[in-house]
Each structure stands twice: as structure tokens, then as C-alpha cells.
Amino acid sequence: MRPEILNPLFAALTDLKGVGPQLAKPLARLGLERVVDVLFHLPTGLISRIPVERLDQAQPGQTIIVDLTAQDYRSGRSPRAPFGVEAVDGAGDHVRLVYFGRTSGLARKLFPLGEKRRVSGRLDLYGDMRQIVHPDHVAEPGDETAIAEHEPVYPLTEGLTNARLSQLAEVALDRRPDLAEWIDAPLLASRGWPAWREAMARAHAGPRDEAARDRLAYDEIFASQVALMLIRQGLRNRKGRPIAGNGRLTGALKLPFGLTGAQERVGREIAGDMAQDVPMLRMLQGDVGSGKTLVALRAMLTAVEAGTQAALLAPTEILARQHHATLQQMLVGLPVNLAILTGRDKGKVRESTLMGLADGSIDILVGTHAIFQQAVGYRDLALVVVDEQHRFGVAQRLMLTDKGARPPHLLVMTATPIPRTLLLANHGEMDVSRLDEMPPGRTPVDTRVVSVDRLDEVIDGLGRHLASGAQAYWVCPLVAESEASELAAAEDRAALLRERFGADAVGLVHGRMKGPDKDAVMARFEAGEIGVLVATTVIEVGVNVPAASLMIVEHADRFGLAQLHQLRGRVGRGTAKSVCLLLRSQNLSETARERLALMRETNDGFVIAERDLELRGGGELLGLKQSGDADYRLATPEQLVRLLPVAHDDARLFVERDGGMDGPRGEAVRLCLYLFERDAAVPLLRSG
């Protein structure tokens, strides 16, 4: 239950006087639906106004506050012409107040002739005539407080004015309660941070108040870290069961070559965890092609050897079906029953799979999030492997741990190398293993950067590549603003290439296609029936076609480093020399130039990830609300990098030294968790 003291902050904005359905729409576009959302919607700038008694005391370009009297109206011949109000100051100096866009009625109402008004706006010169275009405030004279000398500027959207948002921010600030201090006292003193209530007011009043902003960012990061620590502690406190294999299946696996040293080391770490009666909670980080699937399969076979079941969860249907096909090949000749379950499986097929899971005849299940729906029951689930885990939130990962009679061991894998800061931010509850060695036979991909001006040459080169019997990917630019324009770009490129190479030689996949249609194109590409696959970033993760040895990324400067590295990892999977062409725009920013240069210099995903964090401030992983956990509203990426290690250490002290939720800081930290909505996963710890 949320503490009662916080309830006023979690009231809907539509409960407030003056916030009707019309105002609620633009507010919702900004994600502002509750009072707390407005409280955390901090200003990004400040308007400073200079009060003057006479116009000649101000310089053109300054925003001023001055008393003016309207003397006359001036309207053009056309209804669309600007409407002017001729006015004078106390000394009789003239200024014209200009309104555009059929607003003459409003201007006449604001400025009755012969009456004085207190006006604020930017003073400009039009020829030698002073003018103020669309005054931002008009008030009755004599009220010195009606127009603020300093006004915060908030991020806005169409249909919402800064003045209206400022009023809502005042309401939100009035509702903020006095909360007990959750930050460790010595830390608070050493940083010179204000109390939470004061920090909130200061952050709204002054966008450059670093102490207030840092304090609030720290609170949000600390709440996340405590939540992860409590999850870890909760899982550690739950009784699991030791799983040990006898080697009859792992020993019978037919491998194309021996295990790398890294695979053997990580295998020992995982086996050591599974042999404990505390549920494993481990992340396996491995660059593209480092052999994570084999490590995961050996862990799953260990579970099967022990007479239990294992499940592999993939983020997309394409990836789930591909994992299923890959594991089938690897398990040829072994007495292991492998099945797949996705949202698309219906009727008798689905029923048969559910029965096999319940009676234990299915040993390993591969699937999408459908595998942890309520209707899916297992006879004895002992190990869950989650692939590309940054697509799944903490709460989703924990749902899986409620599927067994006792919490199963959990292994999460990612081919996106994650810098330590981001590991702490989103995965602080896990132990981490790294596959930092490539299996023999993986050839480094030759990466080249080419100007988009040379598109014709690139298409000619693609023609020669296809003529040699090889295959290629062509990834279309990421258009963040609109999925529709991203799709249009892919369709246009596919049409152009079909014209050149024939309709049958070119396939197209994108996020809006239905599952079966997407699978059909992918199957034709894997079978070699399609020469070039045009795609949006739907192929970023996990697609495995060894015969494809050319990757072309259009407008590569629009992609993050981590994403480019993932895309490049789609080639270099066979024995043929592979090339990745990054097509760049003509006008590159300095950051984009550095990013593309780094891609050319190294194939090491861990080097790329650390540099990506420096160049982008972690936006690639933190900005996407994929997981529902990396959603920081107050902490900027820069603050995250700077404050996260401190918050991580303080959260650990809170849990391990200060008695956690039962200790003296417990009640205050509970308020912090509920305030920042980091309480969602906590009930899951108590279940099962």
C-alpha cells in the first residue's frame, strides 16, 4: 500500500479545478497525468524580465515589464493582417503591441482604450518604431506580483502554454509533503544538498541550481538501487534447490570445435551457482558471436540431466524461432525433447505443448513472453534463460521465477555489451559473467564508411556481390520521430533494388508485418532464395544467416554505436570475408564522426560500449523505455554516471549495515521507493 502522506501527489490532474478533457490531452502527450508527473517535469530555462517605468530605460531585445495605456487600434485591410494596439508609457513615449492571426478580438478585450495595463514582453524595433509582438502577460496596473520577474520555462507541446504549466507546477509544489530524510546523514552533509521538499522548490525556481537538481537525481537513482538490492536480497532469502548434472548430455554434445577458455570459465561459474540452494541470478555478457547460446545450452542440459526442465525466453518471435532451430541442430542425436511456444501457437499445437510441459515430457521450452502467461504450467522448472534481457524489465524477469515449485535459477544473456555504470543502473541485483574471447573461425568484419553520395557505386558493388552467389542485408535509416516514415524509407529502398535486381531477389521485413509474413521472408532469406534483405532495425538482434556476408547501413550516423555494433554482428558468421558498409550523411556532427571512426577501428563490443556511454551519455540504453526499469525522469545520463556509484554504495549500506526496511532508515526509504514508483517489483519477492 502506498503511504497515505503521498496520496495528494498521486491524484489525477483531471481532479484539479480547471483541468478538463481539453487540457488533459496536451498534458498526456507530455506524460503528465498525475500531480507527481508535473512535480517531476522540471523547467529547462528561465525568463528574466526587467521592470521599467519608461520605455527609454530599456534596450531592444530585452524582456520588460512596463505600465502602458492603449490609445488607438490599427487593423490591416485583410483579416489575416496583423492587428496593432498603439500605446504610450507614463512619459508619453509610443509603442505598438502587435497581434497576429485573427486575434483582434482578444487584443481589444485586453486593452480597452484609455485604460492603463501592466504589460510584459520582448521590446523590439521595427524600423524606428518600438513594438512588442504578442505580449506574454497583461495584468491590471498596481499589482506588482501579477507578473513574475523570473519565470521558469517548461518543456511544452501544442495546446499548452508556459503560463498554464507554471500554474500547475505551483499546485504540485503546494501539495508536496514534508518527508523524513532517507539519505545517509554524513553523505547529505558532505554534499551540501537541501532537504527533499526544499530541493523540489529550488529545482522549479532555478533550472541551474545544481545542488537541488543533483539531490533529486540522487533520490531517483538511490530508489532504483535500493529496489534492486531488495530484489536480490529477497531472491537470496528464498529457498531454491541445488541442480547438478552427471555429464551424460553435455558430454554427448557434438561441437564443431572445442570450448574457448572464456566459455569454460563461465560454464564453471554457472555450474557453481546452480549447485547452490540459493537461486542463481546471473547475467552472461558476450559480444556477438562469442558463443553464448552454447554456454546457455550446456546449463539447460545440466538441468535436464538432473531430471528437471529449462526454458529459454526470447524478446521476438523471429529470435525465438531461430533459437529453436539452432538448438534443434545442436541437439541432434540427444534424447532431449525440445518445444517452442509463442503467442502465435494456437489450438491443438498449443494444447499439446502445454500438456507436455505439465507432465514433464518436454525438457526444454523456447518461446516469447507467452511462456510466462498464467495458463502455462511446468512439472518442474529449474532453470530460466532470458536472451537479450535489456528488452525485459525486472518485474518480467521475476514473473518467471514464480513458475517453479521453488524459484528456478535465472540466467540472463545479452549481446549488447553494457558499461559498468549501466549494469549498476539496471542490473544491480545480478552477478555478471563475461565471454571476452571469440571461438576460432570467426573472421573480423571489415568496416568501411562511405558517403551517401556514392549510393550508385554501392548498389553496383551490391550487384557484383549478389552475382557471386553471396547474400546481403540493407538496413534503412532509423527515423525516431515516426515509425511510418521509417517504414516508407524501407519500402522505397526495396522498390529501387527490386527494379535493379528483380522482384524475387529482394525481400523486405519491418516491425509492422504480421509474424507469419515476416517468418516467410526470413525463411526464404535463410534458404538462399532471396539475395538481399531490406529491413528496419527489426533484424538488429539475433538473426543468423551464415551466407550473408555484406551489411549496408543507410544513414549510419543516425544510429547509436551499440546498435551499429549489433547490426554489424549479423555478418561475419560464415567462412567468407564479410564487409559492413556504413553510409553516412554529408553533414556529420563531431560525435557522429567519432562514432563512425570507432566502428572502423575496432570490432570489440566492450570497447565500443564504454565509448558509446561517453559520447551519448548512455542514451542508447537509458533513453529507451523498453524495460520499464530504465525510466529516469529527474536524473540525466551525466548525473547517472556521476552519482550512481555513490547511490549503489549507499543502497548496499542501507540493506546490509542499517537493517534494511526494518532498520531506522526503513520508513523514510519506503517513502522514497513509493515516491519514485520503484516499489512495483517488491511484492513479487514475497510470492512463491
Image (cartoon, rainbow, N blue to C red):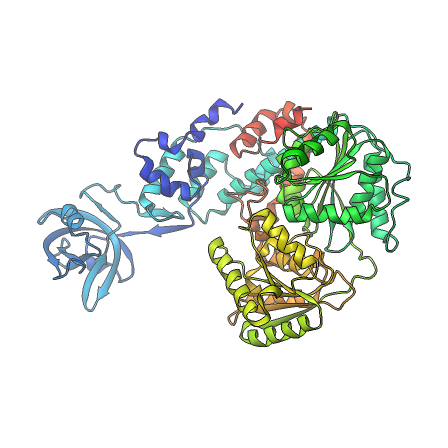
Does residue 589 appear to the left or right of 572 in the view shown?
left
Considering depth in this image, is 548 or 391 the residue closer to the camera? 548
Q: Quadrant of residue 35?
A: top left
Residue 243 x %, y %: 84, 32
Q: Nearer the viewer, residue 2 or 394?
A: 394
Q: Position of residue 146 (x, y in %)?
A: 25, 42
Image height of 623 relative to 170, above or below: below
Q: Is residue 512 visible?
A: yes
Q: In screen coordinates, is 304 left or right of 72?
A: right
Residue 519 in the image, given as x and y percentages of width and height: 63, 51
Q: Nearer the viewer, residue 259 or 431?
A: 259
The N terminus is located in which quarter?
A: top right
662 over 458 or under it: above or below: above
Tell me where residue 174 sits by quadrant. Answer: top left
Question: Which residue is situated farthest in the front direction here?
Answer: 348
The residue that appears at 65% across and 55% down in the rendered structure is: 522
